[in-house]
Amino acid sequence: MKRADLGRRGNYGALFRNGTMDFLAGWLLGCSQLGGLSPGALLHTFARITDGDPRSWVDAFARAADATTARAEAASDPVVAAGAWLAATTAERAALMLQDPRTPNAEAARARAAEAFEAFLRSSGVPLEPWAIPFAGESLPGYVSTDLTRTRPLVVVVGGGDTSAEDLWFLGGGAFIEAGYAVLLVDLPGQGSTPADGLHFGPATLDGFWAVLDAVRGRGFGGDIVLCGWSGGGFFTTKAVEASRPSDRIVALVASTPIHDIGSMFERAMPGLARRAPRGVLAAAVTASSRFNPVLAASLAKYDWQFGPLGIAGALEAYASMTAVDLTKVDLPVLALVGDGEDAELHRQAADVVAAGRPSSRLITFDHASGASAHCQLGNLSLALAEATGWLATVAPASGDP
Amino acid sequence: MKRADLGRRGNYGALFRNGTMDFLAGWLLGCSQLGGLSPGALLHTFARITDGDPRSWVDAFARAADATTARAEAASDPVVAAGAWLAATTAERAALMLQDPRTPNAEAARARAAEAFEAFLRSSGVPLEPWAIPFAGESLPGYVSTDLTRTRPLVVVVGGGDTSAEDLWFLGGGAFIEAGYAVLLVDLPGQGSTPADGLHFGPATLDGFWAVLDAVRGRGFGGDIVLCGWSGGGFFTTKAVEASRPSDRIVALVASTPIHDIGSMFERAMPGLARRAPRGVLAAAVTASSRFNPVLAASLAKYDWQFGPLGIAGALEAYASMTAVDLTKVDLPVLALVGDGEDAELHRQAADVVAAGRPSSRLITFDHASGASAHCQLGNLSLALAEATGWLATVAPASGDP
């Protein structure tokens, strides 16, 4: 009785029958390993949601956000306050997952998520500060280590179509800091709140990447850079490796999963949406699906907003025409993290990029029993991040020594 | 459509319709905040379980235990190995939750859980070692800090009817070590594997408590002792405070929840089971319930084993006749942790004990939105333990300085 999801992302079917909702709920529970909304707070919230009804999801998480914010503001103990602020961040972001991003409510929720995350940083004393990186007359929101040093590699963490810079805390931000690295968590055009500023997925996303790397140098950082990409970020980072200049000093790539041919990925991994007559059919599908699967419709509407004037349908066409990454230019160590629950096309492309990388490159496949088999390994991020930091210590150690 | 549970423990209803199963599943997800089986591994396992069928639960977790053990044995990275061993511990313990404890399979699972936990300690380098404390010709299984010092308080963590010493890692073991305390995690008679050695809940449980405290002194520890009790451990620790000798140097009590009148607690908080004509009806109910609720029957059969020759029915009668704790003898700071999802009788007794304690005593009530409202705060242990260590720092600081 599972309903269509956006692709094969490896949901569990234990929480909701609606495939998208089940995947998102599993994502949130996965993050709870590393802080934010606790399992109990999530189960309490899930119990208030009507399966397949996005409005009930948004309402339930808005209530969770209000409650956690109130708890954070009332907390006297800094550890308790920090935990509650991170939970508030997660709750605001969770509500946004299935909310129309064009509304004033969504705009306010995005602002509250960023404010809650900054309050988390202040309460916890984590050495990370907000950084708005200028780009195309607007700015890219990010968080950067307050203690950048020349000798310590900087890990630039980039997400995908569902993430914001705040979410990247769970996708390596916290783990890499704990392992001794400097980090930059950043939204490229199309991600987080940037579509509200007219920045969308497409060529601008990669332009943004170069602006970010230049800004890092402008801030005085002269050390090595590691790229870490999740979901769509697996494409942006692989593409950035291909086109990088020696002065960028990109010394390693960690991706879940590295993608070298985005057109083929969209065509093969999202067959129902993209393969059959892209533009017209997809646009129609968005409308039609709102009748039988409003959760899927809400997801698609969000992607539509992120892709800008062309919408998701036009953007998929544009991606399909992009040339694949020249794998001979992937001349560095690559760590690919892939889950057994993910599409075969992602496995194939990840293996290609690893084979192209230097000999220390590795592909780690997570089986279902590990809990890390879903997209972005979100059912066992602790394991995925332990593998990532363990591998990174061998190719770009945090001490800065080879 | 929720089915009867053993009492009001505050389950969520998001995972299983069977009340006991839903509570236990929420418990396991709650533990995942602190390591062990990841949310993804749990959701994968839950998806294999037939709602209300204890055999499917046992089978699914036995498979999870096999898979995590294989992963632990294959891991080269010590962090990955440690995580997998703790997951294997949790999986073995989870299978035992609804398994007939008298079978050779259960005996072997208990042994494997202990072995996996010891492998976790070795891989992780956590300064904790196994300790079999002699008692009544048998021994009480425990884990104690390898670095006991005179000046640093020792937190003795005691669980309830559903825990073993390994489970206590999640119930303060890890958190107190991280906060700088020495810890002792121990099974009293009736807990963990002790019923297999003829040790049962009842007067022997408290006798065991004194044997443990004497053994701590025999090991050369001369410092202050903090008691931390969960579930039934909230009664054992409160009772131990009442009867403690000055030489025991018990300086604080943390309990979720402190219980001073066990007879009243059983009578009021488990009305369907205990209030109406205790012995005969309860014994009959165990048999009858196996027909309409085999999960509840499996739980009751486990308790029956833990209570020994009298069985759970006779034991409840025995407890009902026990005199309540003399609250004038509770002359120390008390921290009570209580969830809004728990029975009113637990709230009432916790408030009584806190009122009897020294002025620095506190009662913290967790609401549903916090996620910590269930029994033992297992939906947000991070929050409960942050409150506990924050409070403990004010009454018995880890430095040993007042």
Image (spheres, coloured by chain):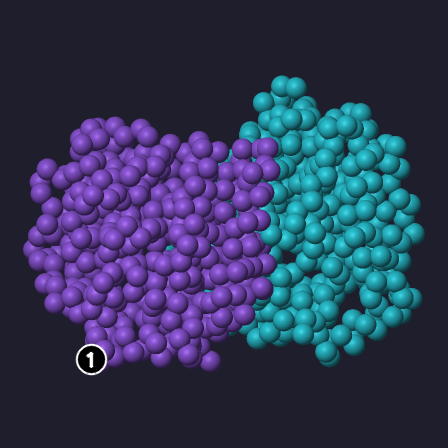
Chain colours: A cyan, B purple
Looking at the image, residue B13 sits to the left or right of residue A343; the answer is: left
In the rendering, at what x and y percent does residue A217 appear? Answer: 70, 28
Q: Which residue is mark 1?
A: B277
User: Which of the 4 image quarters holds residue A123?
Assistant: top left
Q: What residue appears at the point 51 percent right and 55 percent down from the top-left corner?
A: B62
Q: Is residue A295 above or below residue B187?
A: below
Provide the chain ID for the residue under circle 1: B
Q: Nearer the viewer, residue B336 or B11?
A: B11
Relative image position of residue B245 (x, y in whole percent): 9, 43
- The vertical placement of A201 against A224, above or below, is below
Answer left or right for B187 relative to A219. left
Density class for disc 1 (Cα within 10 Å; few <14, some 14-19, many ≥20) is few
B357, B258: nearer the viewer: B258
Residue A15 horizontal/vertical position (percent): 57, 66
| Position above or below: A55 against A66 | below
From this viewpoint, is residue A199 visible? no
Residue A114 pos. (x, y %):
57, 51
Question: Which residue is farthest top?
Answer: A401
Q: Residue at x 62, y 50 (%)?
A: A372
Please state which of residues B22 and B56 is positioned toward the viewer in this rendering.
B56
Depth check, front residue: B72 or A216: B72
